[in-house]
Image: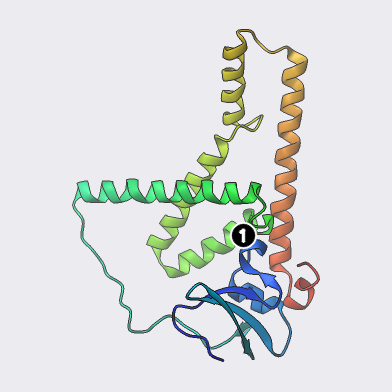
Amino acid sequence: AGILPGDKFIKVGNVDLIKAGKDLQEALKRNTDTVVELTVLRNDKELTVQVRPYKEGDRRLIGIELDGTQRMIVKTLTLGQAFKEAIDKNIQIISSTFDILQRLFKREVSVRMLEGPIGIARHSAMAAESGFSELLMLMAFISLSLGIMNLLPIPVLDGGVIAIILLETLIRRNLTLPIRERITQVGFVMLILLAVVVTYNDIIRTLPAPLGKYFP
């Protein structure tokens, strides 16, 4: 079809992968066309190619894979080096999390990329099949992400409590009980809405492809 090594897939049909929060395999699965138009980014230019996916189990494939000549490099680190690598990895995860949050607020990516308990269970199963190290990395990523989310200035979360304390410090007086109750109610509603969104996303992802196409 003309796909070359180094091409970056950005669209499947009219679905923008980044904005829709979908990966290539999921988008292909939900596209039931016999011939699918893919948009790739090559040397900073967008090109379109026509592919005819084939089925393998419940997946639709187009015959691409990672370069088989690549090899995993395993390094043995000292305790100090391992500690530094761990710090660097945590900083990378934190930066990625804030980047995603920023793009969500700017509506550059879709809320459909958010996942809840069902999504976590699915990714955990995949990580467990890949090995203990992958599962451990996923557990660390989830724990760190939850810690970051908990520090956001949303009422009822720890970050919201900190924000209220800072506000009271600035105005040099305590907020009245009715105001605190309203702030707590707003925070509770925000968390309920977030729970509804991620649960909806989880359910849509578990639907068979013929049904999933009705939920873009």
| Amino acid type shown at disc 1 | Gly
Give the class, few, some or many, for how many residues have Cα within 10 Å of label 1's Cα (few <14, many ≥20): some
Q: Where is residue 127 in the image (x, y as percent from the top left)?
A: 47, 64
Residue with the mark numbered 1: 119
Q: In this view, does 209 lie to the left or right of 165?
A: right
| Residue at 20% from the left image edge and 60% from the top image edge | 76
Q: Where is residue 45 in the image (x, y as percent from the top left)?
A: 54, 75
Q: Is residue 141 left or right of residue 109?
A: left
In what element is the residue under mark 1? helix
The number of discs equals: 1
Q: In this view, does 198 lie above or below 169?
A: below
Q: Which of 102 and 125 is in front in this view?
A: 102
Q: Position of residue 177 (x, y in %)?
A: 74, 14
Q: Is residue 59 left or right of residue 196?
A: left
- Quarter holding the C terminus? bottom right
Q: Position of residue 74 (x, y in %)?
A: 26, 67
Q: In this view, does 41 lie to the left or right of 35?
A: left
Quarter occupied by residue 113: bottom right
Q: In this view, does 45 lie above or below 55?
A: above
Q: How is the image coloured?
A: rainbow
- Quarter holding the N terminus? bottom right
